Each structure stands twice: as structure tokens, then as C-alpha cells.
Amino acid sequence: MRALRRALRGLFRAPREGAGPFERRRRDPSPSRLRYRLDRLGRRGYVRFALRRLAWPAVAGLALLWAWHQPWVWARGEAAVEAARSALVERPEFLVTRLRIEGGSEGLKARVARRVAFDAPVSSLKLDLRAIREAVQTTPGVASASVAVMGTGVLSVRVTQRAPAALWRWEGQLHLVDRDGVVIAPVARRTDRPGLPLIVGEGADRAAAEALRLWARAAPLHDRLQALVRVGERRWTLALIGPQQVHLPADGAERALSRLLALDAAEEILEREVSAVDLRDPERPVLRLTPRGAGEAARMRLVRSGKGEDA
Amino acid sequence: MRHALFAAQRAMRDQLRSALKRGLLGLIDIGTSKTACVILRVDPAKLAVSSHEEAHLGGFGAMRVIGVGVTRSRGVRLGEIVEMEECERAIRTALQQAEKMAGVRVDQVVGAISGARPASFGATGETEVMTGEVTEADVAAALAECPEPPLEDDREILHALPVNFTLDRTSFLADPRGMAGERLSVDMHVLSVAGAPLRNLARCVRRCDLELAGVVTAPYAAALSSLVEDEQELGAACLDMGAGSTGVSIFLRRQLIFADAARVGGAHVTRDVSEAFSIEAQLAERIKVIHGGVVATGLDDRELIAAPPIGAPEGHERHVTRSALIGVIRPRVEEILEEARALLDAAGFDHLPSRRIVLTGGGSQLPGLEDVARRVLGQRVRVGRPIRIGGLPQSAAGPGFAAAVGLAAYAVRPHDEIWDFEAPATIGGRTRLRRAVRWFRDNW
């Protein structure tokens, strides 16, 4: 650059009078006023500080600010981050190739596998174990689940199956429920599960535990007990074949049932013409007779009063 | 002497004081042939100690040269600025060079002015000592009692130095403060210079964004750096042989008692050489510096110097003998010395107890100058070099830098010019009463 300028100057300027060919006119060494001022300004303490300590951070900050507002920088940056991420994620050390489900019946395992919808191979970094566990736990019939990635590329799901404890009829459909009233699976017919108690009515599932306790207490009546009916989400009514009904109170249902069993054992009241036993008032159990029983009773009263023979 | 005369001097002294406090000071010697700029770093603490305890050392230990810039002067003739723009550029060049070397920025500079027709006056003032013991106020009062020198048109007082104090009948006192006595009289040396060159210098310096922290006449500065302590004490003259002017200064009892400048110098020698052999001025300068001399010997007839005349065609060669060169140089040198001699005679140098003469300045480097000077000026002549200051590079330690180094000596020595003393309170009773009344009116 400087050589070029010198050559140009030599071209355009006529040679100086009296100057030899090898003599070059020396440039004026004095700085221009502007250059002098700038030079002296640059020697001020605060200017030196600003140039040395603040200039580079300021330039870097401005550049960052500019880049922040450039969409292509964002796109480029995100792509780079994604590439780096995937390069890490796709490493064979992180690959999960198999799903192993432990515990529970075969049907349950199939349901869980369907629910998890695991498509191998996938990187373990991409797996959301919490979501998988959530999915497994919300599968009907699963009591609890633990999900873990094993070192050998196996996604291990450990499932505890819910034990069916009762049948619940709800809106015309039979459901299998466990001790806590959680629905496990639908059941087609009552006869598929003859050994389980049947509970009926709205809210019966939530009170399944109480129903099971009543069922256990009512063991002598098992051959006659058809269902436990939840009434008004408050109390139970035992539906016996006959049809007979035993109305239990909301509080102290078990005690009332024990009393009934005692009465039955002593007086065999359920063998008699009774259509309903109302135990809701503990002071005063009430029996309702069947129409035939009622007629018999009226007749017996007449006989006892001595008029029946005549009638 | 009215203190109001010295407002500018006081302002410059304030600048100098602040520069010394900051510890950075620039010195600019604008000579006819070169402009030199020296940057000093001064240790203020050391300077304060040295001014109290080692006054005879003059604070030299407290300063150090950290930057030197030298460039060719343009636009200066006979020690006076004749082209502002060119001179300003020379200052900028030299200052920037020095700042680059020092790596700092200086704002205050002390300048030397070599021409400007200095003129010395003596003045005597006398006062009653107020408390029986001389205080600074008494000294100031005695100084203020000095009559003003007869200033012609447009002249400025550059130095006003108390030279001698007399207390009652005891004379030759350097510092009468604290001594007992009744009448204090002071002899003062007042040096005035032409106002226009001084203002030009100030303007040039200001246009370079610098503050002027003092102006010293170059003969004084050169003597400060070139005379050794005993010479200053016993009495000696210093000839500062510059390019445009030859400064003469006389010291006695460590005080400058006379300074003047002859308006002839080394540049005239160069011009003589150039004219005598009709060669270019630059070549003449070069021949003078390399081959010049003032005492011819037989050998010089055979020493040939290439000196192509102006406008000679290429390849044309001409040689002059060294004796011819000496024959041109010597009359002019003798003339310079005789001019100086005349100035010394006018100052009464013959009556001094010791009549030593020290030659310094760039012109004193001519070989054989001492012999010629002995013949013209007397036997006690020597060629002197400026004292060494720490950090001064070898290239700037020659006699040509006597004035620049002397500026450093001036800056760090104790200042006792008239404007360094407080103006004595001269307000009378009526003024005082009026002021009191006005103060009451203003405040209540």
C-alpha cells in the first residue's frame, strides 16, 4: 500500500530541482494536528483504561446483541445444539432395545406393553421414565409400578397386579374391582366370578372396603346373599334371595349385621315370611312381612282371638 | 514594583507547582536549529525533602528524564519564532516523540526563549523590619519597594530575582528570614525581554494543547546546567553558543546577575561556509560539523573536502581544503566571541573576583574553539557540558542540550522570584473601613 502510494507520488510529481536521482525528499515528520490530538488523547488515563479494559468486552457485547437479533444465527445455533445433542444421545451406550415387564398376569403384561407403546431401539436419554411409570400405573389392574433402565439396554417395568376383591355393577356393566374399589377390568357375566361378592350402586366402589368387611362378617349368609347394595352413597342394604332385604345403618353396620346373624341363629328370622329387616334404628329393628306372611299373621291373630274358625 | 504586573507569571508558577505535584513536567527548548523536548518525572516527596535538607544539590536526585524528543526547528530565526505554523509543528513532533518514549502525557511545559533581546537591570528596595525579626512578609515588602526598571515599549519582565540581601550593615545574605535586624534592603536583578517573541512562544505552546508552566531565558538555563557549583559561587560567565544567538550570563554567589544575548551564532557560520564555497546550506552545515575547526595546521592544507557547488551538473566534483574552511569559519567565530566579549565588558565582568568563562551550547563543539576563546576572552576559559541527569540518553547529553537540561535544573530548584512572595497588604485605613461596611451590608 505504502509502496504503491510512493510510486504514484513519484509518477505525478515532477522531480525536484537540483535533487539527484538517488536523493529522495524526506517526508515531513511532524504529526498533523488531528493525529497529535488523538495521540495525546490516547495517552489520557481514562482513555487508556477504556481502550484496554472496556473496548473488547464492549465489542463482544455489541456483537452478541447483533447476533441475538439475527434469525439465521438462532437457526444455525439451534441446529448445532441439536446436532451435538443427537450425537450424544445416539451413542450405543445409551440405547434401550428391549422392554421387560415383570409381575402380573399375561393379560396384564400385554395391556401394560400396549399402554407403554415402546418402540425399540430408543436412547435412554429420550425416555421419560416418569411418564412411562405414570402410564403403567394408570393401566387398569396395576397397583404399583417401578420403571428403570438396566445397564444392558433393557427397560425394566416391575408391576404389582391388583387383586380382584369384588364385582361392581355399575350402569348395567359388571366390573372387577380390588379392595380399594379400583376398577381392574370389565367382566361379562356374574358367573365368571362366582366367588366374589357383588356390590351394586353408585359409590359402592368407594366403599368397597366396608363392603368386603360386611361380606366377611356375613359368611353364614353367603349362599343366600346376592349383592350388597349401596343406598344413597351412605349405607348398605343386603339383597338376599327371597327376595329379602336387610337394611343396614350407615354407622355401625357391622354391629347391626352381627345382631342380625345372632337373631337369625336364635330365631331363624330369615327363614320366615319376612321381606325386609330394617336395622337402621339400633333401638328398634323392624321386620316387614311378606304379603303371605302378613295374611298368615292376620289369620293367626283371628284364630287366637277365637274368631278365626268361624271366618 | 507592582505585583499586578506579574499575574501571568503567577499563573505559570501555579502550573509549575501543580506539574511538580503531579510529578510530570515537559521542557521545551525552541532553538534556532533544533527543538528539543524533555519529559521529566519528578518525585514530589523527594523534591520536598531535597529542597529543605540538600538545597545545594538543587533537587537533582528527585528527577529523572523519561522521554526525549529532538527535531529540526523550522520557522525560528535568531532565537525568535518567525513562523508560528512551522514552529508549532516542530513542537508537536518533538513532544510526540518524547511522549512516545516516555509513554505518558504531559500537559505542562517549561519553555526556553533564547533570543528576544534580554536586558538586565538592577534594582534596590529597602524596608523597615516590622517585628525585629525578618519574616517572609518583610522580604516581600522589600521586594515590592524596588523601583520598576525603565521598560521600553512592549517589554515583559521575565525574571525578577533577589540577588543580595542586606540587613542593617550585614550584606551578602542569601536568605535573611529569621534573622534579627531593623532595615532590610534587597538588590534585585530584573531581566526583561521583548514582549512579542514571548507572546509568540506562549501562543505556539498553547496551540499544541500545552500549558506553559514558565519561561526561562536560554542563557540562564544554560548556565544553570553548565556552571559547576563553585563557578556559580565565585563568579563565572556562561556563553551559550546557539545557532541563532549567543547567550551570555554571569553568575555570582549562586545568583544570576546578568544575562544578555548577541544576535549572532552558529547559523551564521554555516551561512558563511555556504556562501564562501557556494554550496547548499545543508551540505555546509554537514561540512562544518564534520570538518569544521578554528585552528589551522599544516596538515589541513592537504585535507580535501568534497564540496560540489550549487547547481553543479551530475558528476562534477570540487574539493576545498580544510584550511580554507577554517579560514572561513574562524573570522565569524572570532566575531561571535568578540560580540560576547563586548556584552561582558558592558556588564562589568572585569570587576568580578573570578573571571571564569564556560563555553557551552552546540557551537562550543568546534574543535580548537577553546584556544580562540582564550585569545579573545581571557585565559580562564573552558568548554562545559551540561550536568548529567538520571535517565538522560547519551544523544541528549551534549553541550547542545545545555539549555534543555538547564530548564530541568530551573524547575526543581527553589523558586524565589518576586512573584513567589505574597504581595504585601497595601490597603490603607479608609479602604479597610469601606470594605468592612460593605461586608456588613452584604451579609446583613
Image (spheres, coloured by chain):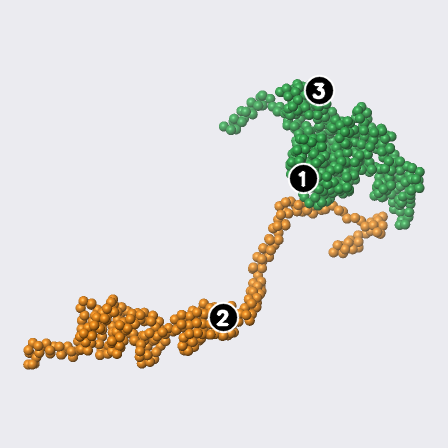
Chain colours: A orange, B green
**Residue on which the image places disc 3:** B170
Q: Helix or strand or loop: what does disc 3 sit on?
A: strand
- How far is mark 1 from mark 3, CA to CA? 41 Å
Protein chain holding label 2: A
Q: At label 1, which amino acid type do we have?
A: Leu
Protein chain holding label 1: B
- Give the side of residue B244 with respect to residue A235, left or right: right
Look at the image and tell me whether residue B167 can be seen: yes
Q: Residue at x 47, y 69 (%)?
A: A148
Quarter of the image for residue B192 reads top right
- The answer to the question of whether label 1 and label 3 lie on touching residues, with beta carbons closer than 8 A, is no
Q: Residue at x 71, y 35 (%)?
A: B60
Look at the image and tell me whether residue B9 can be seen: no
- The image position of residue B223, as x and y in percent, is 76, 32
**Residue on which the image places disc 2:** A150
User: On residue B24, which mark appears?
Assistant: 1
User: On residue B322, which mark appears?
Assistant: none
Q: Helix or strand or loop: what does disc 1 sit on?
A: strand
Q: Residue at x 23, y 68 (%)?
A: A255
- The image position of residue B308, as x and y in percent, is 89, 45
Tell me which numbered mark, 1 or 3, is placed earlier along the sequence. 1
- The answer to the question of whether label 1 and label 2 lie on touching residues, with beta carbons closer than 8 A, is no
